[in-house]
Image (cartoon, rainbow, N blue to C red):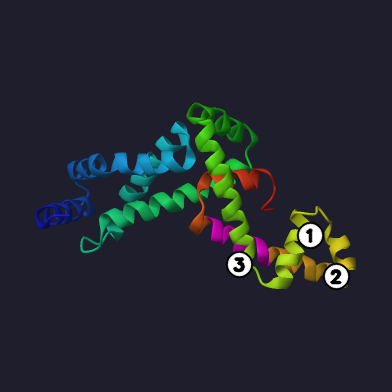
Amino acid sequence: MSGKKVFNEKFLIKELIGGNNKAFRKLFDTYRNDVYAYSISMLKTKVLAEEIVQDVFLKIWQHRDRLNPDLSFKSYVFTITRNLTFNLISKVANNRKLKEEVFYESQEFYNPIEDKIAEHDYEIIKNNAIEQLPPKRKIIFKMSRNEGKSYEEISKELNISVSTVKGQMSKALATIKDFLQTHGDVTLLITLLSSRWLE
């Protein structure tokens, strides 16, 4: 970013902090396409991507008094974008009607070759996430998710209490969700949450 652009952006942010609508509009026009492109590439749905754009800039306007003109506004924008995108995961996964709309609309973006590649990549990411777990936790997780065994069955087979199994699964799920948020994308997370793989 050129020095002049940095100066202009800093000026716009200071104006935005003071409630200047024109400065807000200028920043909105500058970054809205980037936010939309980021969202659509992750969610594959126009409706949610457009919703993210609106929510991001609404949040920026509502909390404009917290802005720091000396910090990267672009980083701030994308931090909000990322956080709001991940907040949609549980919303979509737990709302049947919304979930159906999301996956129906995502068919517009369907590409058999890309889908096959994505499926392969997702499997690698899932396996890498599981490999991050400590040995005992990994065994318990695989017995539950890959072998479909109940907590009681795992408890008896490994000669440990059911509460221990539950505790280890809870920690495993937290670790895997965190790994997927860092290394995967929202489409994968929504898919896994919807299939109850991460519950």
Of the numbered discs 1 and 2, the one sitting upstream in the chain is: 1
In the rendered image, residue 120, in percent from the top left (x then y), is placed at 58, 46
Residue position marked by numbered label 1 in the rendering: 143
Q: CA distance from mark 3 to mark 1?
A: 16 Å
Say if 145 sits above or below 51 in the image.
Answer: below
Give the distance between the C-alpha atoms of the residues marked 2 and 3, in whole angstroms.
21 Å
Q: Foreground residue, 177 or 30? A: 177
Question: Does residue 32 show up magenta in the picture?
Answer: no
Q: How far, Cα to Cα, is label 1 from label 2?
A: 10 Å
Residue 111 horizontal/vertical position (percent): 50, 31
Marks 3 and 1 in Cβ contact (< 8 Å): no
Q: Is residue 91 above or below residue 73?
A: above
Say which quarter of the image contains residue 91.
top right
Report the front residue among 127 and 67. Answer: 127
| Residue 177 colored in magenta in the image | yes
**Residue 97 in picture, x, y percent from top left:** 62, 32
Label 3 neighbourhood size at 10 Å, few (<14), some (14-19), many (20+)?
some
**166 on left or right of 129:** right
Residue type pointed to by label 1? Met
- Mark 2 — residue? 158
Q: Which residues are magenta?
A: 171-180
Helix, strand or loop under label 2: helix
Q: Horizontally, is 142 left or right of 13 in the view?
A: right
Q: Residue at x 45, y 53 (%)?
A: 83
Q: Which residue does the image show at 53% across and 42% down from the upper left? A: 117
Between 187 and 102, the residue placed more toward the observer is 187
- Does dot 1 land on a helix, a strand or a loop? helix
